[in-house]
Amino acid sequence: MATPLSAVKERFESKEKLVAAVEKLATKELWIGRVNDVKGLKRASNRKLIRLHDLLEDAKKRFGNRDKLIESIAALAQRPKDKDWVASLAGYPLPQLLDMHRSFDRAAKQRAAAGEPEKKPKKEKKPMVKKPSAKAQAPKAEAAKVEAPKAAPGKVEAKKAEPKAEAKKAEPKAEKKAEAKSKPSASKPAASKEPVAKKAPAAKKTPAKKA
């Protein structure tokens, strides 16, 4: 059985050349750098280095970069419109993404073999602005009517009758004022009329006596 060391010598001749091959593939388009800066890839075991090299080489051949790999995973999972979930995949390491793609691909093939129809992605629904319904406004109007105190029927009739009574009271007052204008007021004394001097009776002419 071949050992990791023999595989390194057979494929890369030395560990240094294996590390150089891994670093060449581990670009930002595929790899999230989580290697210890002190230890680096040189301190990793031969087994891990070979596996990492194979994963990077496979991802580059099939997808080219991480973004296309994530798009493929979302399509297989039938969740391409789920932006939050797709965005969360960007933080996953490459080995985990490849494992997810493998499992979703297997599930899709099983559905196809069973004849199950593929689910169409749901369309994004636009946020609906709710308009105030007439039913919602009706209770408010009823509540306002209930809150306003209703006047007693007797009081309403009395209020209606008051203007008529005031009109009747106003009529005799107007008549009295008219009479007061036509008659001299009792408070002012009437102008005193001086008695007209009687003319003295004319003197009767006595007939002259004949001599």
Image (cartoon, rainbow, N blue to C red):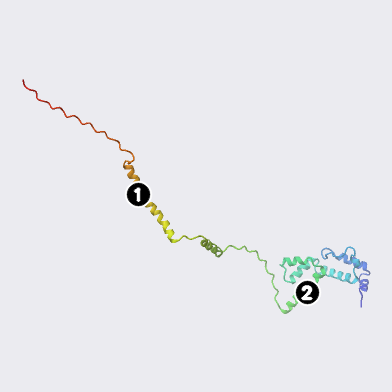
- Say which mark, if any, is on residue 100: none
Residue positioned most to the top: 211
- Marks 2 and 1: CB-CB under 8 Å? no
Name the residue tied to disc 2: 103
Location of the N terminus by quadrant is bottom right
Name the residue tied to disc 1: 172
Residue 182 drawn at (x, y percent): 32, 42
Please tell me in which quadrant of the rendered image residue 132 appears.
Answer: bottom right
Foreground residue among 36 and 174: 174
Location of the C terminus by quadrant is top left
Please tell me in which quadrant of the rendered image residue 107 appears.
Answer: bottom right
Which residue type does callout 1 highlight? Pro
Q: Residue at x 88, y 67 (%)?
A: 22
Q: Residue at x 80, y 72 (%)?
A: 99
Residue count near mark 1 (Cα–Cα under 10 Å), binned few <14, some 14–19, many ≥20: few
Q: Is residue 135 left or right of residue 127?
A: left
Residue count near mark 2 (Cα–Cα under 10 Å), binned few <14, some 14–19, many ≥20: few
N-term mark: 2 or 1: 2
Which residue type does callout 2 highlight? Ser
Q: What is the spatial separation of the Cα atoms under label 2 and label 1, in whole angstroms?
A: 107 Å
Please tell me in which quadrant of the rendered image residue 100 appears.
Answer: bottom right
Element assignment for label 1: helix
